[in-house]
Amino acid sequence: MAKKKVSSRPKIPDNETKSERFIRVVAPRVSKAVKAIDVIGFCAGSTYEYTPDQSVQIGNALIKAVNDLRVKFDRKANKQDSFNFKP
């Protein structure tokens, strides 16, 4: 007889709103991203050797990723349904 798989994920409510789903999905993803950045910071210790240029490249890559994220959210927030000429 086959064993039934037990999911570690909580059951998703059938009547979940888009806002509730957003909160449920985004919170753990943001936590995971912050932890990943913290782990990158461990490489700044004396165990590793890196150049100032490498450090700048890492910072720039992370800043670009955050800026790209902000653009995605701002684009939706600033989306207009109608068009009007500006004076």
Image (tube, rainbow, N blue to C red):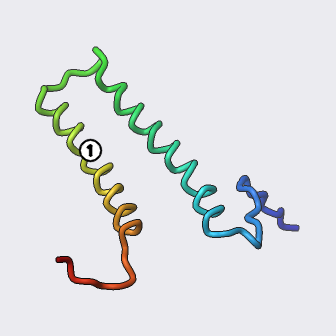
What is the number of callouts on the image? 1
In the current view of this chain or complex, which residue is farthest to the right? 1
In depth, the one of 78 and 54 nearer the eye is 78
Report x, y in % for residue 32. 50, 44
Report x, y in % for residue 67. 28, 52
In depth, the one of 66 and 43 nearer the eye is 66
Left or right of 7: which side holds 19?
left
Quarter assignment of residue 74: bottom left
Left or right of 23: which side holds 52?
left
Q: Secondary structure at mark 1?
A: helix
Quarter occupied by the C terminus: bottom left
Left or right of 7: which side holds 74?
left
Left or right of 31: which side holds 48?
left
* Tag 1: amino acid: Ile
Quarter occupied by the N terminus: bottom right
Reply above or below: 1 against 81.
above
Q: Residue at x 57, y 49 (%)?
A: 27
Reply above or below: 3 against 87.
above
Report x, y in % for residue 82. 35, 85
In the current view of this chain or complex, which residue is farthest to the top? 46
Quarter assignment of residue 49: top left
Report x, y in % for residue 83. 30, 85
Q: Which residue is mark 1?
A: 63
Q: Residue at x 13, y 26 (%)?
A: 51
Q: Residue at x 45, y 39 (%)?
A: 34
Check disc 1: other Cα within 10 Å, few if <14, some if 14-19, many if 20+: few
In depth, the one of 71 and 85 nearer the eye is 85
